[in-house]
């Protein structure tokens, strides 16, 4: 079997590509990333097809954040369209084309014209569900939200329709597609893996402290507004809250204006994975109260470092852990439930340690990206026959 992949950036698609290459099944992978950013992907150069002319121009330059939103939206739309057309024009002979949603439609149609199969790989909830959740959340906080580009929504829904199969990373995402009217027999659950050689315990938390960690881009979508409220309520003499990932000055300003931003919050910004595993190993808990995620890979990464997780039921957590065993799963937007579980961990060091050990055992049992590759190949063989 020969499989072609495409993704506007990297996401999990390069992890999948390595697994397919190891099985002799990778025909090519197309990406909007420039080649110099892909030197460490452990794939032959001739199998990586780059089309960075639009995507890289506004992602890799410092002036991106100063551009008007309307300009960024146009560039993002152009990036998806041009990459999709490029893949279609240059699609190698294959049995199956797997395209990350948003730029997969032209090549999906080309694959069908040739008699090959097309899988739409969606990393988040159904795009209309995603847009609805984010609109609702911004309205709750009286913050502006222009919504997902209607052109992107239309393009993705045509991809869902054209695809022979849609792979989704979590039960939460699966449900969102069914609720939007996609037949269940068109969906395949394919949870992401974790690089167990990159993430493992390298340190231990300080017993007398209670250090909470958030990893991800700071936004309403990630539930930062609920995390800071819960943190303020935690009773512990030596607590801390650390943010790793893209900071948001506007969100900090909005939360500060409402008296919700903690003065002692630590904002570290982006961090390489070599340093991330250290802070995950030292933290007592990873907290991710997101409004919407596909399957947040930082949860498995933290678990691989022996760090328990407290996450909302919209993060894919139920596909990684059992509530009350390796961590806790709380209802979305529920500050009381989030506070209760965090306080429980703050008060019970023995429970924290036990959950951390079970979290590590769970991800080791699930397996890394190799197990993901096995399951992907099973889905592909079923589809291709």
Image (tube, grey):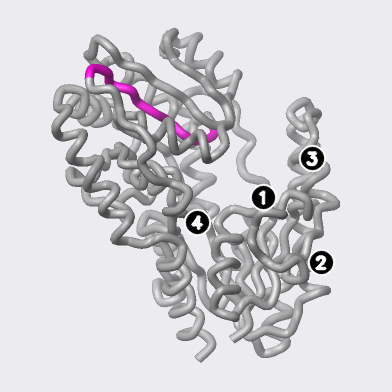
Tag shown at residue 58: 3
Q: Out of 28 and 32, give the one closest to the viewer.
A: 28
Q: Out of 331 and 285, give the one closest to the viewer.
A: 285
How far is the residue under mark 1 from the one under mark 2? 22 Å
How far is the residue under mark 4 from the one under mark 2? 25 Å
What's drawn in magenta, residue-wise? 208-217
Tag shown at residue 126: 4
Q: Is residue 148 visible?
A: yes
Instruction: Name the residue rendered at 60%, 19% in the picture.
Output: 250
Q: Secondary structure at mark 4?
A: loop
CB under 8 Å between discs 4 and 3 = no
How far is the residue under mark 4 from the one under mark 3? 26 Å
Of pointers 4 and 3, the one earlier in the residue sequence:
3
Query: Looking at the image, is 171 positioned above or below residue 273?
Result: below
Of pointers 4 and 2, the one earlier in the residue sequence:
2
Residue 173 is situated, as x and y percent measured from the top left of the image, at 42, 56
How far is the residue under mark 4 from the one under mark 1? 14 Å
């Amino acid at each position: 079997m020969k499989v072609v992949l495409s993704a506007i950036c990297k996401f999990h698609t390069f992890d999948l590509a390595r697994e397919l290459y190891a099985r002799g099944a990778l025909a090519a992978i197309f990406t909007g990333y420039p080649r110099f950013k892909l030197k460490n992907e452990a794939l032959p150069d001739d199998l990586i097809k780059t089309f960075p002319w639009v995507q890289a121009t506004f992602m890799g330059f410092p002036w991106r954040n100063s551009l008007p939103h309307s300009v960024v939206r146009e560039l993002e739309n152009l990036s998806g369209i041009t990459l999709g057309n490029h893949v279609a024009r240059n699609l190698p002979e294959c049995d199956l084309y797997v395209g990350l949603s948003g730029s997969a439609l032209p090549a999906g149609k080309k694959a069908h014209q040739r008699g090959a199969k097309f899988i739409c790989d969606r990393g988040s909830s159904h795009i209309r569900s995603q847009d609805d959740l984010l609109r609702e959340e911004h309205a709750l906080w009286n913050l502006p939200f222009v919504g997902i580009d209607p052109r992107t929504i239309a393009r993705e829904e045509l991809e869902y329709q054209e695809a022979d199969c849609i792979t989704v990373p979590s039960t939460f995402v699966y449900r969102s597609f069914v609720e939007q009217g996609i037949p269940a027999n068109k969906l395949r659950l394919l949870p992401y893996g974790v690089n167990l050689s990159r993430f493992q315990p390298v340190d231990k938390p300080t017993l007398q402290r209670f250090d909470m960690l958030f990893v991800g881009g700071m936004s309403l979508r990630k539930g930062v507004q609920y995390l800071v409220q819960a943190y303020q309520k935690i009773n512990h003499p030596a607590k801390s809250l650390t943010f790793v990932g893209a900071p948001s000055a506007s969100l900090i300003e909005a939360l500060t204006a409402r008296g919700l931003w903690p003065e002692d919050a630590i904002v570290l910004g982006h961090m390489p994975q070599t340093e991330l595993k250290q802070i995950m190993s030292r933290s007592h808990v990873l907290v991710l109260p997101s409004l919407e995620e596909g399957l947040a890979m930082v949860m498995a990464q933290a678990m691989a470092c022996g760090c328990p997780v407290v996450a909302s039921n919209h993060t894919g957590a139920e596909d990684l852990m059992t509530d009350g065993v390796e961590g806790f799963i709380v209802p979305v937007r529920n500050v009381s439930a989030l506070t209760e579980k965090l306080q429980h961990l703050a008060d019970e060091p023995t429970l924290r340690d036990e959950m951390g050990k079970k979290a590590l055992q769970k991800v080791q049992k699930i397996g890394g990206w190799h197990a993901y590759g096995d399951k992907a190949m099973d889905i592909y063989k079923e589809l291709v026959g």
